[in-house]
């Protein structure tokens, strides 16, 4: 019973913590990927991240807390991760790209 209570509290914390992206940052919304990184950013502030590195993987599913310039902070309370955006979303030959943590990501086409 204690595990169920903790799980429910965690779910409510996650739901209540995300903030919608500001209009000036809506270009970040979408599925971004490379061979070693996957990043999904939703307009409601939900972020899903996976990175393969050094024979292991890192996964984060958490709310976006805030932007600091082009960088963004994801997490809950003191458990946060800063994503270092060295090149904000930009277009090149009709394709969207962004450089995060030194990795050039391409944006997947939107499917309606």
Image: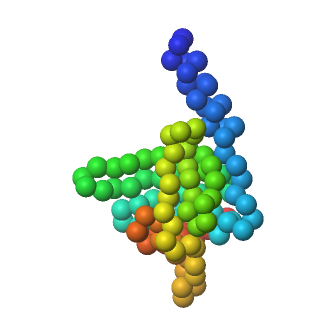
Is residue 61 visible in the rendered image? The answer is no
Q: Residue furthest top?
A: 1
Q: Quadrant of the C terminus?
A: bottom right
Does residue 112 appear to the left or right of 104 in the view shown?
A: right
Residue drawn where x is 57% and y is 40% of the image: 76
Residue drawn where x is 68% and y is 66% of the image: 26
Name the one closer to the observer, 94 or 45. 45
In the depicted structure, whether residue 28 falls above or below residue 79: below
**Residue 43 in the image: x percent, y percent?**
68, 57
Does residue 101 appear to the left or right of 74 in the view shown?
A: left
Q: Residue furthest bottom?
A: 93
**Quarter assignment of residue 1:** top right
**Residue 107 in the image: x percent, y percent?**
53, 70
**Residue 95 in the image: x percent, y percent?**
55, 80
In the depicted structure, whether residue 91 falls above or below residue 34: below
Name the one closer to the observer, 80 or 30. 80
Residue drawn where x is 52% and y is 51% of the image: 48
């Amino acid at each position: 019973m204690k595990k169920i209570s903790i799980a429910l509290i965690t779910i409510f914390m996650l739901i209540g913590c995300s903030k919608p992206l500001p209009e000036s940052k809506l270009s970040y919304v979408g599925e971004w990927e490379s061979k070693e990184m996957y990043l999904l950013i939703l307009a409601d502030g939900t972020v899903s991240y996976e990175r393969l590195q050094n024979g292991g993987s890192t996964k984060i599913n958490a709310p976006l807390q805030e932007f600091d310039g082009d960088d963004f902070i994801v997490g809950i309370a003191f458990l946060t991760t800063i994503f270092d955006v060295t090149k904000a979303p930009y277009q090149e030959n009709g394709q969207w790209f962004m450089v995060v943590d030194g990795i050039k990501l391409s944006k997947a086409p939107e499917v309606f």
